[in-house]
Every structure is written in structure tokens, then in C-alpha cells.
């Protein structure tokens, strides 16, 4: 019965909505689910085998706005290079999962990641200043920053004002 229902109402991937779902999962603190969905819509996932490549028929390095499901087009990507989906996908990954957020020239790191991610690093340049960021997740959390340390000094407000002063800033975030 379920298969017949799916034939009448095919499930297509509308990538804008899929990225908004990732953002929603991250906002709710569900890092495992956000990462699972992020991986699922990654275009490279549609190019793991020759058979998948023949179905997808578009570039595996460009996110498609749609992945079709109707019988003759099932698995085929559409609307690459024309879509805002890539920017939403980028935003979902960088801002909502890795937690890299800049508001009014203030940097905050507010991750929502899978529990099995033990650490990751990011590097960001502002003018002639360099920000080296390491996020540590020793207790396997999805979200929640316990400590924010800049050049060895803990910041109670868990943020830093960005500066272009030829500085090097080593930031450690502990979840």
C-alpha cells in the first residue's frame, strides 16, 4: 500500500527546504540529525557509484535545487548553478552546525554538532589579523559552550570583538 501512495505522491528533494530543515534541527539542538541531513543532501552522495552518477546527471560538486523522484527522472538533479540552495547549505553548515557567527563585528562560536565529533578547527582572517579556532567536545555533546578561551584567557561572555590589528588570536571553545 505504501509503495502505491509514493507512486501517486512522489517525494522530491527541494533543497531550499531541506537546508531549512537542517537549520531547524540545529536550532533545536539536534546535532546528530542536522549532520545526517547535511550529509544526505551533499551532492557527492549522489556520485558514489557509476549507477548513481548516471541517475543524478549533474555535477557532483554543485548542489542541485531539486532532486526529482518521478519514475523517468528518479534520482536526477536539477537546477544546478542557478540556485540559492548552495548559500543556504553553506549557511546551515558554517553558522548553524559549526556555530561560526558574526554579529556586529563580534564573533561567537555556538556549535550544534554530532555527539561523536570530538573536535574541529576553523581559521578566519580579518584584514591582517588571524583567528585560529579549535572546538573541543570531550564529553560528546550536541550543543552548549562551557568555556571560551582567547590566547589563554577565559572570556565569561563567550565571544570576542573582531579586530584588524595584525593580531593572532587562538580561540579554544569547550563544549
Image (tube, rainbow, N blue to C red):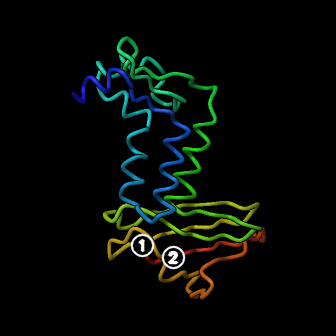
At horizontal 72% and vertical 66% (from top left) the residue drawn is: 103
Residue beneath the point at 77% across and 68% down: 104
Q: Is residue 25 above or below residue 81?
A: below
Q: In the picture provided, is 117 more to the left or to the right than 155?
A: left
Closer to us: 33 or 150: 33
Q: Position of residue 87 (x, y in %)?
A: 62, 42
Answer left or right for 72 relative to 97: left
155 or 79: nearer the eye? 79
Q: Residues within 10 Å of mark 2 (few under 14, many from 20)?
A: many
Q: Quadrant of residue 167?
A: bottom right
| In the rendered image, the vertical position of residue 145 relative to residue 72, given as above or below | below
Q: Residue furthest top?
A: 72
Q: Residues within 10 Å of mark 1 (few under 14, many from 20)?
A: some
SS for dot 1:
strand
Which residue is at 40% across, 15% downward?
Answer: 73
Q: CA distance from mark 2 to mark 1?
A: 7 Å
Q: Are marks 2 and 1 in contact (CB under 8 Å)?
A: yes
- Residue 174 pos. (x, y %): 45, 78
Element under label 2? Answer: strand
The residue that label 1 is drawn on is: 136
Q: Nearer the viewer, residue 169 or 31?
A: 31
Which corner quadrant holds the C terminus?
A: bottom left
Residue 77, position as x, y percentages in the image: 46, 23
Instruction: Using the rendered view, name the quadrant where residue 47 is placed.
Output: top left
| Disc with the residue nearer the chain's start (2 vs 1) | 1
Residue 130 screen position, x and y as percent:
66, 65
Which residue is identified by label 2?
172
Q: Which quadrant holds the N terminus? A: top left
Residue at point 47%, 20% (across, down): 58
Q: Which mark is residue 33?
A: none
Amino acid at each position: 500500500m505504501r509503495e502505491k501512495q509514493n507512486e501517486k505522491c512522489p517525494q522530491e528533494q527541494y533543497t531550499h527546504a531541506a537546508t531549512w530543515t537542517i537549520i531547524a534541527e540545529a536550532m533545536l539542538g539536534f546535532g546528530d540529525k542536522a549532520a545526517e541531513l547535511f550529509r544526505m543532501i551533499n551532492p557527492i552522495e549522489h556520485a558514489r557509484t557509476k549507477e548513481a552518477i548516471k541517475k543524478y546527471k549533474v555535477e557532483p560538486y554543485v548542489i542541485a535545487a531539486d532532486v526529482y523522484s518521478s519514475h523517468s527522472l528518479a534520482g536526477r538533479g536539477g537546477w544546478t548553478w542557478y540556485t540559492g540552495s548552495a548559500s543556504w547549505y553553506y549557511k546551515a553548515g558554517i553558522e548553524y552546525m559549526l556555530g561560526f557567527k558574526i554579529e556586529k563585528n563580534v564573533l561567537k562560536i555556538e556549535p550544534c554538532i554530532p555527539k561523536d565529533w570530538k573536535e574541529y578547527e576553523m581559521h578566519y582572517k580579518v584584514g591582517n589579523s588571524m583567528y585560529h579556532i579549535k572546538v573541543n567536545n570531550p564529553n560528546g555533546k550536541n550543543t552548549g559552550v562551557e568555556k571560551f578561551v582567547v590566547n589563554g584567557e577565559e572570556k565569561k561572555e563567550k565571544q570576542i570583538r573582531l579586530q584588524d590589528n595584525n593580531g593572532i588570536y587562538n580561540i579554544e571553545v569547550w563544549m
